[in-house]
Image: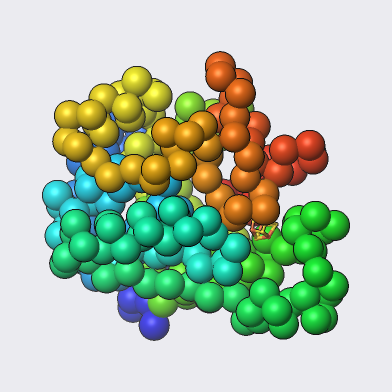
Amino acid sequence: MSGSRTPDQLEALATGASRRLADATAEQALRWAVEEFGDDLIVASNMQDAVLIDVATRVKPDVDVLFLQTGYHFAETLGTRDAVAAAYPDIRVVEAHPEQTVAEQDAEYGPKLHDRDPNRCCHLRKVLPLRATLADYSCWVTGVRRADAPTRADTPIVTWDERNGLVKVNPLAAWTDEEFDDYIERHGILRNPLVAEGYLSIGCAPCTAKVAPGADPRSGRWAGSAKTECGLHA
Ligand code: SF4
């Protein structure tokens, strides 16, 4: 169960903090979140890298980390998840599973739903499991950055997540690509080995392609289709 505050109270909290923390650093935003919510928050990671986890564990070493186990991940992503769990032994990796296995989904909807109806596939394998897991928390923390894509250009540091009914904190929202890469370099942060191979935005294997040099990093997601977001953040 999430904390004792009502959705209205959480929304008011998020609205006030959104103003006060509009220009907060990542550490300031996380300190506020941890002081406000304690164990009642969870950090989401797609295991592309451990930047957000590293920043969060400096404030709360035993933080919960949410990983959406879609059943379609690259082996390298699962390896990164295991390496992260070993490198940050105090965290608790919370895996959110879809209601159906890939085989069960194939049986009901036909194979490769991701090719025919990716919105439905994402809804079943990401959006619903995320919502079910977030129902146990009052706050979630994501690694979304304004520099990720034009659709993310207005990402606030703190906001009210109406759809999932909890506070959402994006501590890295203002970080540029240079600041992000510099943090990885300076702190020796774990990174999914696929990044070095040109996969600059890593999601499920069937929907992730290499990105051409100089191209928008997220252009490798659902390449060839109009879809740009899985529905978790937009
Ligand atoms: Fe399905 Fe692709 Fe979405 Fe993963 S990213 S849930 S495989 S449509």
What residue do we see at 75% from left, 58% from top?
Answer: 114
Foreground: 7 or 72?
Answer: 72
With respect to residue 62, does 206 lie above or below? above
Question: Which quadrant of the view contains residue 151?
Answer: top right
Residue 5 seen in the current view: no
Foreground: 1 or 223?
Answer: 223
In the rendered image, residue 109, in percent from the top left (x then y), is placed at 83, 74
Question: Which quadrant of the view contains residue 106?
Answer: bottom right
Q: Is residue 234 left or right of residue 169?
A: right
In the rendered image, residue 149, in percent from the top left (x then y), is placed at 57, 30
Q: In this view, does 76 lie to the left or right of 114?
A: left
What residue do we see at 32% from left, 63% from top?
Answer: 82
Task: Count all numbered tags in the image, as a single digit.
Answer: 0
With respect to residue 23, does 91 lie above or below? below
What residue do we see at 58% from left, 69% from top?
Answer: 71
Q: Is residue 83 left or right of residue 59?
A: right
In the rendered image, residue 141, in percent from the top left (x then y), is placed at 37, 53
With respect to residue 223, does 63 lie above or below? below
With respect to residue 174, does 204 lie above or below? below
What residue do we see at 79% from left, 64% from top?
Answer: 113
In the rendered image, residue 204, in percent from the top left (x then y), is placed at 59, 55
Ligand 1 in which quarter? bottom right
Residue 76 seen in the current view: yes
Foreground: 191 or 146?
Answer: 191
